[in-house]
Amino acid sequence: MPLKSPFFKLLILTLFLFPGRVYAGIPYQLVYLKNYSAPDGLPSSRVNYLMQDSRGFIWLATDKGVSRFDGQHFKNFTSADGLENNECFRIAEDNYHRIFFYCNNYRVCYYENGLIHKLNSSQKVIVSPFANFFFNRYNELCVNYRLSTKVYHFEELKSERHAIRYLNGYIYGSDGEEITLSENDLDILEEELKAGQLSFQTANTNIKPYRLALQQNYLLLITKDWVHVYRYQKTGIIPLSKIFFTGNVTSVYLTGKNTFAVTTVKQGTYIINYLTGERKNYLNNNITTATVIDRENNLWFGSYDKGFFLCTNPEIKIINKESGLANEDVLKLAIAGGYLFTGHVLSTLSYMKLGANQTPPIGTITINQDRSDFNRITNLLTIPGNRLMIGTDNGIFRLDISNKNPLSWHSVKIFYGPIKGIASRPDTVYFLAQNAVGVLTDEFKHQKGYNFKPIRMTSLTWYKDKLLIGSLYGLYQLMPTTNDITYVRILANKGINVVKSLASNNEVCAIGTEAQGVFLLAGEKIVQFRSPAIFSGDIRKLVWTDDNTLWVCTANGVSIISFYNHYQNYRISLLNTSNGLPSDNVADVVQNGHDYYIATDQGIAVTQNLGNTALPKPVLINDGISGTQNSFTYGRPVVFNCVALSYKSMGKIQYRFRLKGVDKNWSVAPSGEKRFDLLPPGNYELEALAADRFNQLSQPLVFKFDVMPLWYQQLWLQVVAVLSAIIIAFLLVRKYYQSIIGLQKKDYENALALQRERQRISSEVHDDLGASISGIKLRTELLSRKTADQPAFKEIDAIHEAITDISTQVRLIIWSLDAENDEVSNLAGFIHKQAIKIFEYSNIDLHVNASVSETPVTISGEKRRQVYLLVKEVLNNIVKHSEAQNAFLEINLYKNRLQISIRDDGRGFDPDVRKHETMGIRNIHTRAKRLNAELKIDTAHGKGTSIGLKLNL
């Protein structure tokens, strides 16, 4: 028969056999409980068991699988993930931090590295509903039931070898304890059981089960009716105390140091200190199944049909509808005549007597406002004489509570109209109406009002004999006179604009604003408190509970500012749902003795603790698979997972990430997963932090990892590739230069051959043709002398001149062909000599200036010839046409640029006309174009002529 049937049949049976039985004298603890069930992500709302593992996770066993909870998310596992059966009853952690699950089919499986693993053995494990399931110091699976420990061995457990003892009375504890009970000890325990009508048979049938539990040196004999506590000594066990309880008990578990929890049907859970006997009851009218006190001192309660509940601060008590409160949305609080008064909507005023040991009954008074809408209680103020001033949306009322009989209390209306605030001085009450300040004096017999401009007033207070008015348009100071009122806006230059609450304690004044937090006015000094130092910048109410303690009520919780050293120093503590309030939306606070009453929209919280300034910081855990490599290949996504455990933050966790040495700023994420898609190859350190809702930071978590390059990104391959590229480039360049050198060598050889050919032609022309022409010239000259007086002289003389011209041309050709003349200096000298010959028989004075560097500069023969012919053409034109007295020839060489300037002081000419009419000008332009030279002619009638030639060599 599966375990499910006897366990739950017994549960239902006890529900009918023992209806409504409670523990006498145990006060019920009404605390704030956060409920999680199937709609929140739990596999099922039936929680059979829960525990906290060594890393801090909460594990839950349900009838539809198991779940791991981190405060934000549920990670569920079912039979589809490898669980032996969806219905799980027990969870335990072994010494290797593996989580073991005991399922409905009497089989055990375990969780490790994100996966569920099954055991190879088919051996069944028997765990009765009242038995305990844990691992001992040797990593053996143990079940404590009756007066012994049943030990199971499996290969996967990797249990430590030791002297195996199967003696009756040999007991293990879950924290490494182990003892051996002597025969005398066993006799004492059996006598105790016999007296309670418990035996081996009653335990086997689960009618009256019992078991032993070991915690440090305390031995507990646990039954469903009582727990007997013994101190264990080797000489024998010593009885300490016997704790009785009644009711429909389902289980008893050790929950922490010197405490155990009793879960029941319809009476909730009882937590009992077995040394002091202190008992506390939680979750009344619920069927509870398991209880855990975690390392943050939070309480976890598993239930049969409502999932589980989390209590973050069991020290804060709650007053709500379950306590008898008429409306949980509490707007205002006041204490008068030993009663706590609470104001609500719908004209409702609740009251309860203070100082009672048990929670007293709560009464209700309805304020008659003569309308069904706009009927909130807006202000409560206690004045001398056990009287209470009640401000509403429709007027101000007085309630006399000097008579201790609440049935005789009746409210009296004093003023009609919406009330925004009430303040008092001896024998005088001041209040804010819609557009006026009202004053009540002489036991409320006299009323006086002062008109005020429509600035939407919100609050008022007396500060150092000055009446201050807060409004949505700033802070005002009022000075009432006999017939009128004088007011002036103050502190506008400090940025105080929208004022929602004022509170003073004679020494200082606190100013609550809509978005700027709190301003503290102390004489001439102003101190500002804003988020995140306090919960919010939008202030609902400010309350001084004493001269040094200011409560700042906001929609995100209440901040308590405790001042010391004459308000020079302070410390701030915070209260919200994370540390026990039923809601973050806090409206008001009052103090009575050591108790503080905090009004929220989910009831009233009662505490003696002014916040918690030592809240546990979040714990950041690497949620990746342990032992996995920290190297990733480039191109594949790099993913890291971490989880921040802070159950008091109620899931409000912020994660921050940065790559050390890469990121200057933190990146913020709502989850603990960080993903990189294309990180360049290299070594990295990812730093992670978690911030809880109090902005407390966890210890940093560092992931060290490498991004490995692809095969073609390997360093050695890149080096080889670079070297290969260098070698190939070297060979290509070498081949290129070799080809260039070959071409240059070939060109050089061709040039040398050409030069030799030119030298040969020049020599042959000089030796053969030149000699022949010279001979003809000589003969014609002799002939002309013989026939000087004869008619044929003219023809002979013409032949002589023609031969002379041919001789000149031949010499020019020889000069241009001769390679020895391929220098600019030779060209300059040749031009100089020829210029002198041209001007030898003219009346023009020639001025020559040749400035050529001594460094040889080569010029080809063809260029020499064209330059010379151009210069000769210009010089001949000067001699023939210029009618000049002076001619100037300048030859310069500068940075391989030949510059020739020829000018005269003659008559000049029109270059545009002459360019097209004369052959000489056309020849000059043609030769300059052949030389690819820059030619410039500057001339005009009567202004001479200047010709410049610039040639790049």
Image (tube, helix red, strand yellow):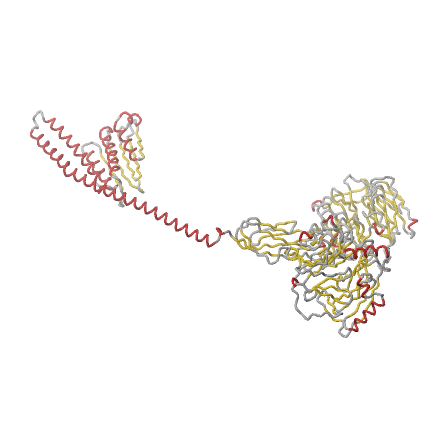
Q: Considering depth in this image, is 730 or 714 the residue closer to the camera?
A: 714
In this rendered view, identify the residue nearer to me: 497 or 274: 274
Q: Quadrant of the N terminus?
A: bottom right
Give the left or right position of residue 221, taking residue 936 as reference.
right
- Quadrant containing the C terminus in the rendered view: top left
- Front residue (pair 20, 207): 207
Residue 348 visible in the snapshot:
yes
Q: Relative to 913, is 495 above or below?
A: below
Left or right of 766? Residue 293 is right
Question: Residue 667 location in percent, x, y?
Answer: 61, 50
Measured as percent of width and height from the top left, residue 582 is found at 78, 51
Rendering quarter of residue 832: top left
Residue placed most toward the observer, 426 or 283: 283
Q: Residue furthest bottom?
A: 235
Q: Position of residue 796 (x, y in %)?
A: 11, 28
Can residue 296 be seen here? The reply is: no
